[in-house]
Image: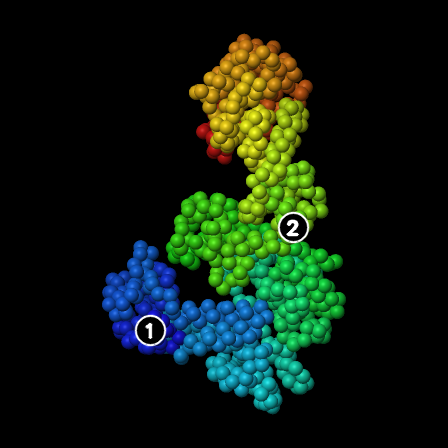
């Protein structure tokens, strides 16, 4: 069953036989309104406004329900009007309006891609669906005027695209003249239509009529608008006067189908670059929105802007032909002649698979045509001297969330957001295409299902725009396109880079992947890897997930990754008790995701050693809750032994265990040991987490001796011992021990506030939230005891704020 709105409302069955029309004017108007959104739910309020206008009568919703009932009775069998809490939905798919829009859109894309033959066929089919004015017999309905005007405008656009394509492929010029006449009667001041008509008349040998048509439109523009003909129409007239070939007429830029979200800074930066430089390249991974940003900026540029889409180009020899098609030049050898002295901006899209050929051609054109400027989009720079680059990566968080909500509302009316949208967008790297693909799935999935399913992102986001280029229809296709452009060695390195989490330094890449700077730089140039401001190399999570699928389970990169990060943790351990404490904490912070990933690699015994080396870091940073689960998994895999008894005990503590079989076994290992503890933090962490344990032999190093003094000072309330411990920690330049000794001294001092202030500053410098909160509450009590209620209130408020930010109990 086809429903037809491009003319009087009508229905035809599968054989094309008309089906009797339904109902009276209101029922027909309701049917037309639902058909415009066929297959989608239309909110009740929108239907009421569409049928009754801005001031609906009392009881309009009841009247709507009555009309729906009448429509249901009048519809043919199998055609239903569904009701949901969100509104009404007409469960049909074959509507001439929807078919026309899809055909016209695909035809325009084919024309822009340099395939005029296909464009002409698609557009001819689209225009053949029209039987008269759109919504002809329901135009009295309030919604109809705006919708009819929109469809009429789309029809004129399609006529222009069709005529341009027919002229390019040598279609019948007299047929074009006849077909364009009615359109010109509708829009006599539409200059592109007039230019196409002039070209058709000239092609039919009616030169005088073509020139006369120009004079008529020139006079009409002057009389009605006080304007001169556009440069494009004037150029057609000039060529007619010269009797030479009339350049093909093409729309300057593809029209966007959706609104533009975010990228304010990038838009301003790109506009400035295009104004200042002759060659600018937007580089970034697939799905970053390079094409859309280029079109957004290009649409606002003064003068002539042309769009060259290389996405459909499959051979290097076709690059120049794509340029010629976009510029309306029949012979690619005449590109320099066509552009000489012509202030044109060329937007050249999708260069990455023919980047070398494009670079040669662009360089040649820029050298020969001083007025030419070029804006290219590519996953790899052209590499031409004078090229200005603008890298394009993830959307900012707020923009990504806004994009998801807007696109989600288009498929699920009424959708305004969800608490997990931010998490979902972050998991998709803020890539616009990935966010849009996820939003499109809201028709069938919830935000929770999408967020929980990111581990299977390629299967989850496997449905996209059917009319989009193949490489942009699914998330997997986006990455596969980039992957296919890599050399074998680059693919091997990219696969091995997937072992890293949260990025890596160049040194780590070299040690783990066995790669030098050259291959890594190549992946950066091809937008598979990005370099952050801190010099770290990182893959977007989507690219990393794809690369990980291509890394064999036994690849040596896994073991090398564990070995490298265990070595880093072991090197950091002693440094965390000295003057370089902050520097090494920051370094471990940067590698936190890699360190946690390393826990699941290597042998269980290697894992115990890694946990032991990281325990001080986790303690100082308050990260034990985050690592408890993977450490508990490690405990289940390990066979405990006295040789690694201390490491086993630290693993038990990191897993958050305070009693049970593991704790008893660890206590036995510690109590039965005869050698000094290898890890200075072991005794302290065990006593603060589980309880004191007699017989432990502490390591004989300055830090351990100072910590032992703090313990004895607490037991004896000895100011002298605290002072001695403080001197030892100060000599080491170690902040946590210094702050701990200061805190102990404050408890015995008649003037504790200066000591507490210094300790608080050190804890804040370290970022130890738990100690900061405890110390603020303690200082608040001191202030209160001294009668300074304002200072006490301020400290407690600050403690609450710090705890909330760190996710602690205040």
Query: Circle 1 — which element?
Result: loop
Compared to 534, does 183 lie above or below?
below
Which residue is located at x 59 percent, y 83 percent? 199
x and y, in percent, of residue 603 in the image: 57, 29
x and y, in percent, of residue 239 in the image: 66, 82
Which residue is located at x 51 percent, y 71 percent? 107
Colour scheme in the image? Answer: rainbow
Task: Please name the residue that numbered disc 2 is placed on.
Answer: 488
Q: Residue 13 got which mark?
A: 1
Give the mark count: 2
Query: Can residue 589 be spotted in the picture?
Result: no
Which residue is located at x 35 percent, y 75 percent? 15
Q: Nearer the viewer, mark 1 or mark 2?
A: 2
Find residue 307 and report its image quarter: bottom right
Left or right: where 275 falls relative to 751: right
Query: Circle 2 — which element?
Result: helix
Which residue is located at x 58 percent, y 56 percent? 481
Query: Can residue 436 be spotted in the picture?
Result: yes
């Amino acid at each position: 069953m086809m429903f037809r709105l491009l003319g009087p409302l009508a229905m035809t069955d599968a054989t094309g036989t008309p089906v009797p029309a339904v109902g009276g004017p209101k029922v027909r108007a309701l049917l037309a309104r639902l058909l415009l959104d066929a297959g989608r739910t239309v909110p009740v309020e929108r239907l009421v406004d569409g049928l009754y206008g801005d001031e609906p009568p009392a009881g309009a919703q009841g009247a709507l329900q009555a009309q729906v009932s009448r429509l249901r009775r009048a519809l043919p069998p199998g055609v239903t009007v569904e009701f949901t809490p969100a509104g009404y939905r007409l469960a049909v798919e074959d509507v001439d309006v929807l078919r026309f829009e899809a055909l016209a859109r695909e035809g325009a894309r084919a024309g822009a891609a340099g395939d005029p033959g296909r464009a002409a066929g698609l557009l001819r089919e689209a225009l053949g669906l029209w039987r008269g004015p759109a919504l002809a017999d329901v135009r009295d309905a309030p919604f109809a005027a705006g919708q009819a005007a929109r469809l009429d405008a789309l029809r004129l656009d399609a006529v222009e695209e069709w005529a341009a394509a027919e002229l390019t492929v040598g279609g019948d010029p007299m047929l074009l003249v006849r077909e364009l006449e009615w359109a010109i009667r509708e829009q006599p001041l539409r200059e592109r239509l007039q230019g196409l008509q002039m070209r058709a008349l000239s092609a039919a040998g009616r030169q005088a009529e073509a020139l006369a048509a120009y004079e008529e439109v020139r006079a009409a523009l002057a009389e009605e608008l006080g304007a001169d003909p556009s440069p494009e129409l004037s150029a057609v007239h000039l060529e007619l006067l010269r009797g030479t070939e009339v350049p093909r007429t093409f729309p300057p830029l593809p029209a966007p189908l959706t609104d533009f979200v975010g990228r304010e800074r990038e838009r301003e930066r790109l506009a400035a670059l295009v104004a200042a430089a002759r060659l600018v390249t937007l580089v970034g991974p697939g799905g970053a929105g390079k094409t859309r940003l280029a079109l957004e900026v290009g649409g606002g540029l003064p003068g002539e802007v042309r769009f060259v889409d290389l996405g459909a180009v499959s051979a290097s020899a076709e690059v120049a032909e794509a340029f010629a098609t976009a510029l309306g030049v029949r012979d690619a050898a005449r590109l320099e002649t066509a552009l000489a002295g012509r202030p044109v901006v060329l937007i050249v899209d999708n260069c990455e698979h023919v980047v070398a050929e494009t670079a040669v051609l662009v360089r040649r054109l820029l050298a020969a045509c001083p007025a030419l400027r070029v804006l290219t989009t590519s996953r790899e720079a052209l590499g031409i001297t004078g090229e200005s680059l603008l890298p394009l990566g993830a959307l900012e968080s707020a923009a990504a969330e806004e994009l998801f909500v807007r696109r989600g509302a288009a498929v699920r009316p009424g959708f305004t957001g969800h608490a997990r949208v931010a998490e979902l967008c972050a998991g998709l790297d803020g890539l616009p295409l990935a966010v849009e693909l996820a939003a499109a799935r809201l028709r069938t999935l919830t935000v929770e299902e999408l967020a929980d399913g990111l581990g299977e992102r390629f299967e989850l986001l496997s449905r996209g725009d059917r009319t989009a280029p193949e490489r942009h229809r699914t998330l997997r296709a986006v990455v596969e396109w980039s992957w296919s452009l890599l050399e074998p060695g680059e693919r091997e390195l990219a696969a091995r880079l997937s072992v890293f989490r949260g990025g890596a330094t160049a040194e780590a890449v070299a040690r783990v992947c066995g790669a030098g700077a050259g291959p890594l730089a190549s992946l950066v140039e091809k937008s598979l890897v990005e370099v952050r401001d801190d010099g770290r190399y990182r893959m977007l999570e989507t690219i990393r997930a794809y690369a990980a699928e291509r890394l064999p389970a036994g690849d040596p990169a896994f073991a090398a990754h564990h070995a490298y990060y265990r070595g880093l943790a072991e090197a950091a351990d002693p440094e965390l008790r000295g003057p370089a404490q902050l520097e090494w904490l920051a370094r471990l912070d940067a590698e936190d995701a890699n360190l946690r990933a390393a826990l699941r690699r290597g042998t269980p015994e290697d894992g115990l050693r890694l946990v032991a080396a990281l325990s001080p870091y986790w303690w100082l940073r308050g990260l034990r809750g985050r690592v408890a689960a993977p450490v508990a998994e490690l405990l289940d895999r390990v066979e405990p032994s006295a040789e690694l008894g201390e490491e086993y005990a630290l693993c038990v503590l990191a897993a958050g265990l305070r009693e049970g079989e593991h704790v008893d076994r660890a206590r036995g290992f510690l109590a039965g040991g005869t050698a000094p503890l290898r890890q200075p933090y072991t005794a302290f962490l065990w006593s603060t987490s589980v309880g004191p344990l007699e017989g432990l032999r502490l390591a004989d190093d300055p830090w351990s001796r100072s910590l032992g003094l703090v313990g004895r000072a607490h037991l004896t309330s000895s100011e002298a011992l605290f002072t001695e411990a403080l001197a030892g920690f100060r000599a080491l330049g170690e902040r946590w021990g210094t702050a701990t000794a200061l805190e102990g001294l404050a408890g015995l001092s008649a003037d504790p506030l200066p000591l507490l202030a210094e300790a608080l500053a050190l804890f804040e410098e370290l970022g130890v939230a738990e100690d900061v909160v405890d110390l603020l509450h303690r200082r608040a009590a001191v202030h209160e005891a001294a009668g300074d209620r304002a200072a006490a209130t301020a400290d407690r408020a600050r403690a609450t704020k710090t705890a909330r930010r760190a996710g602690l109990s205040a």
